[in-house]
Image: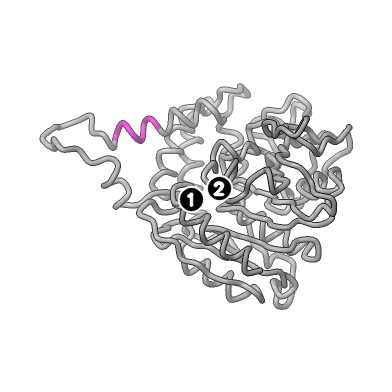
């Protein structure tokens, strides 16, 4: 395919540019499985400078996508922390997702690879996909690699794979190895999907009601008691039913079910569970990641607590740890973007 780097014509900055990496070769997976075909949808935004030193690569979270301006607009965009006037911004939709990259509903796959039979993916498989796109774009230096949650897990794995090609990393609200608590939350959500019998019917809408319930469960791990108190309290507390918080959970379930599918949710939650930078590696694993690192945690995060960010910063040779205050738990990385941007700017200016 022909790769286009620029999103500017006659000096005018255009909208982000979506592209597709495709391969007819088998894609081997860490688990020993394989995919018969492989495609990755990705987005570029901005322009490479002459020495190709202005690349910012964004890794998205569980139900995110490559269109970073849609879900992290507080950090990316004109006049923002990462302005496409200054940076060449790349983001890839991970395999297994629901936004165009090869996933459980992809028609390019063999019938025995689709739906609930989609093979097990890991974070390292996702990073192998990132590497394919990096090489396709002929990018030898990444100025800043940033991601939160599942995206942060990719940041750490990729930094271990190509440490000499990445100048700064910013892992946010993530971990070195997924915790038993996090796995338990994901399993509870998958149990909700399994309880929907349509999940096993080989239909694209399969597991839809189970997905709604799973998302409602997941929201409890992404937010906090105080966060719900701020956004879902009611002045009139004399009712017996139809509470604001109840309708909010229903809304979140419906919202995800309209843009995602149960099979991708299942696949990506399993990939998150598999995350372990120490698997099949010996010694002080993160010692090779000697680039400056800004490790950011959220003080109210139930799912990825500050203790996990402290562990990351201890093991990275040149790390700064920031504890971000938020009443909104894990979702604080999407909410507190102004404070987040200030910390990132200070870090990059210093380095």
Labels 2 & 1 near each other (Cβ < 8 A): yes
Q: Relative to 133, does residue 311 appear above or below in the rendering? A: below
Q: Position of residue 12 (x, y in %)?
A: 71, 32
Q: Which mark is residue 75?
A: 2
Q: Secondary structure at mark 1?
A: helix
Q: Relative to 166, does residue 314 appear above or below in the rendering? A: below
Residue plotted at (55% across, 58% down): 172
Q: Nearer the viewer, residue 213 or 74?
A: 74
Residue plotted at (86% across, 43% down): 136
Q: Position of residue 340 (x, y in %)?
A: 50, 56
Which class describes the residues within 10 Å of circle 2: few (<14), some (14-19), or many (20+)?
Answer: many
Q: What residue does disc 1 label?
A: 337
Say which quadrant the N terminus sits in.
top right
Q: Please state if 305 lies on the left or on the right of 95 as rendered.
A: left
Query: From mark 2 to mark 1, how far is it between C-alphas?
Result: 6 Å
Q: Residue furthest left?
A: 238
Range shown magenta:
246-251
Q: Please state if 154 lies on the left or on the right of 110 as rendered.
A: left
Q: Nearer the viewer, residue 40 or 55?
A: 55
Q: Position of residue 282 (x, y in %)?
A: 74, 74
Residue plotted at (82% across, 46% down): 132
Q: Earlier in the sequence, mark 2 or mark 1?
A: 2
């Amino acid at each position: 395919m022909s790769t286009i780097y620029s999103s500017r014509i006659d000096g005018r900055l255009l909208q982000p540019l979506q592209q597709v990496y495709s391969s007819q070769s088998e894609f081997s997976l860490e688990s020993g499985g394989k995919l018969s075909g492989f495609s990755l949808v990705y987005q570029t935004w901005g322009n490479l400078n002459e020495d190709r030193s202005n690349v910012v690569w964004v890794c998205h979270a569980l139900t995110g996508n490559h269109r970073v301006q849609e879900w992290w607009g507080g950090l990316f965009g004109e006049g923002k922390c990462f302005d496409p006037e200054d940076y060449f911004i790349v983001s890839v939709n991970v395999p297994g997702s629901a936004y165009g990259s090869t996933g459980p509903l992809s028609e390019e796959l063999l019938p025995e690879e689709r739906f609930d039979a989609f093979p097990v993916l890991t974070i390292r498989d996702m990073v192998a996909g990132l590497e394919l796109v990096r090489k396709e774009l002929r990018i030898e230096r990444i100025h800043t690699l940033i991601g939160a949650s599942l995206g942060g897990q990719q940041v750490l794995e990729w930094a271990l794979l190509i440490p000499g090609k990445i100048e700064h990393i910013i892992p946010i609200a993530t971990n070195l190895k997924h915790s038993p608590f996090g796995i338990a939350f994901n399993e509870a959500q998958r149990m909700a999907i399994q309880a929907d019998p349509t999940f096993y019917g080989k239909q694209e809408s399969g597991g839809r009601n189970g997905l709604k319930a799973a998302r409602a469960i997941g929201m409890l791990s992404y937010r906090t008691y105080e966060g719900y108190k701020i956004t879902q309290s009611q002045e009139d507390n004399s009712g017996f039913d139809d509470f604001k918080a109840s309708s909010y959970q229903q809304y979140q379930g419906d919202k995800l079910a309209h843009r995602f599918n149960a099979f991708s949710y299942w696949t990506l939650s399993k990939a998150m569970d598999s995350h372990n930078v120490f698997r099949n590696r010996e010694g002080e694993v993160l010692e090779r990641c000697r680039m400056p690192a800004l490790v950011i945690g959220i003080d109210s995060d139930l799912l990825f607590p500050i203790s996990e960010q402290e562990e990351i910063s201890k093991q990275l040779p040149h790390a700064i740890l920031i504890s971000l205050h938020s009443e909104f738990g894990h979702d604080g990385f999407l909410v507190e973007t102004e404070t987040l941007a200030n910390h990132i700017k200070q870090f990059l200016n210093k380095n």
